Image (cartoon, rainbow, N blue to C red):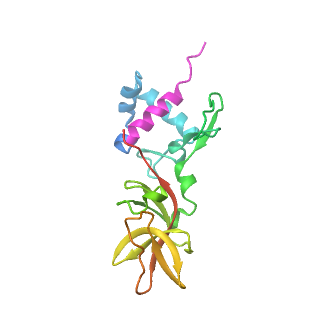
Amino acid sequence: MPPPNKDDEYLSRLRDYFADSRRIPSTHRIAELMGFASKTASRRLLERLETAGFVQRTPDDDAWIPTGRFFERPLVGAFVRAGSADMIEGTGAEPFLVDDYLVRHPSSTVMIPVKGDSMIEAGIHEGDIVAVERNRVAKAGDFVVAIVDNEFTLKELGMERGKFILKPHNKAYPIIRPKGQLEIFGVMVGLARRFPQ
């Protein structure tokens, strides 16, 4: 009977290693991490992961690097209720890449960390990372990153007497009514948040 395939477990260890060091380890280090007897076993693992589409060789063939699939996470095939509980066991999961979900136009999208609490009533908190699309046309009701007094600010774009204004979502902050032309850096299209451990 052949030994069980543990490549999913090995891939998980490689993902954790990459999260800490931002690189795929050497075959010698992989052997240590996985408990392999030789670097040959490490190379075979990397070749299997390459065939499955998780890693690839660099163009000059001197190192292994992750592919987009390396960063996929399982997306459970059920919704979690914010009210009464539902059972989710046995629902299965499909591959999910956060970048594919948040970013529709990679060449024109930037990620910007949020500082301050002027949008807290809209559920945007300090420390959140917002995905901002640069070339998107802003309209009233969009959350935008605007340039005001040479500084970035994240606000809701509003309209007042035919002129654009910037509305905070915190009663402690005033509406911004630009005196000149309002410069829009981009439109917020998504948000990522990591909770404290």
Quarter of the figure with the N terminus: top right
Asked if the stretch drawn in magenta spans residue 2, the answer is: yes
Where in the figure is residue 108, as x and y percent of width and height?
51, 67
Quarter of the image for residue 110 reads bottom left
157 relative to 59, above or below: below
- Left or right: 186 as drawn, with respect to 74: left
- The residue at the far front in this view is 171
- Of residues 189 and 174, the one nearer the viewer is 174
- Total numbered labels: 0
- Of residues 99 and 64, the one nearer the viewer is 99
Residue appearing at x 55%, y 72% in the figure: 136
Where in the figure is residue 37, as x and y percent of width and height?
40, 21
Where in the figure is residue 44, as x and y percent of width and height?
50, 31
92 relative to 163, above or below: above
- Of residues 196 and 33, the one nearer the viewer is 196
- Of residues 53 and 118, the one nearer the viewer is 118
Quarter of the figure with the C terminus: top left
- The residue at the far top in this view is 1
Asked if the stretch drawn in magenta spans residue 145, the answer is: no
Majority secondary structure of magenta residues: helix
Residue appearing at x 47%, y 55% in the figure: 123
Q: Can residue 43 be seen by looking at this rendering?
A: no
Quarter of the image for residue 75 reads top right
- Left or right: 167 as drawn, with respect to 117: right
Where in the figure is residue 35, as x and y percent of width and height?
40, 22
The residue segment tinted magenta is 1-19
